[in-house]
């Protein structure tokens, strides 16, 4: 963070294809955005994958992230798609602290 702007963001990890793709696209989408803009994107993405936002017909800031809209059809995969978003949100809220503590493991996003 540089002030309220996400100056740099990245991820390193293993997991299912959905979680890695979501993390990769999220990092590209939020880099250079303000904390507030990232919060709006988090909310819109989360509502979209839960089926509460129709990204095609309702105004939003998701751009290419709309590709994850189909995840709502697979409730067991919603957590996979949103894991990195929750991690980003936690890191932003802890501005100034060591963000490496927000590392999650593959086991944390597995579904039974």
Image (cartoon, rainbow, N blue to C red):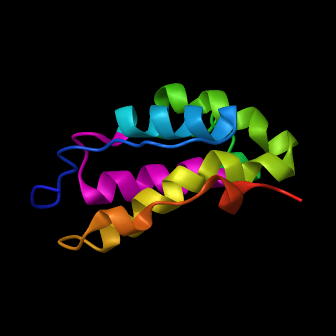
Compared to 83, does 57 lie above or below?
above
Q: Is residue 102 left or right of residue 68?
A: left
Residue 77: give x, y in percent of width and height: 78, 46
Image point 64% across, 54% down: which residue? 47
Q: Tell whether 3 sits left or right of 65.
A: left
Q: Residue at x 76, y 55 (%)?
A: 110
Tell me the residue at 65%/45% (across/down): 81
Range of magenta residues:
30-47
9 or 40: which is nearer to us?
Answer: 9
Query: Which image quarter is the C terminus in?
Result: bottom right
Q: Is residue 8 left or right of residue 26?
A: left
Measured along the vertical axis of the image, is residue 24 above or below residue 83? above
Q: Position of residue 33 (x, y in %)?
A: 25, 45
Placement of 51 over or under 105, stated as above or below: above
**Which secondary structure is most common in the magenta stretch?**
helix
User: Could you tell me if residue 101 is visible in this image?
Assistant: yes
């Amino acid at each position: 963070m540089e002030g309220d702007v996400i100056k740099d963001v990245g991820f390193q990890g293993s997991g299912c294809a959905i979680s890695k793709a979501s993390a990769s696209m999220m990092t590209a989408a939020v880099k250079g955005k303000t904390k507030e803009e990232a919060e709006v994107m988090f909310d819109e993405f989360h509502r979209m994958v839960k089926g509460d936002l129709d990204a095609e017909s309702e105004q939003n800031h998701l751009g290419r992230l709309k590709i994850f809209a189909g995840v709502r059809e697979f409730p067991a995969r919603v957590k996979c798609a949103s894991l990195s978003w929750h991690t980003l949100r936690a890191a932003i809220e802890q501005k100034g602290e060591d963000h490496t503590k927000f590392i999650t493991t593959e086991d944390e996003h597995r579904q039974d």
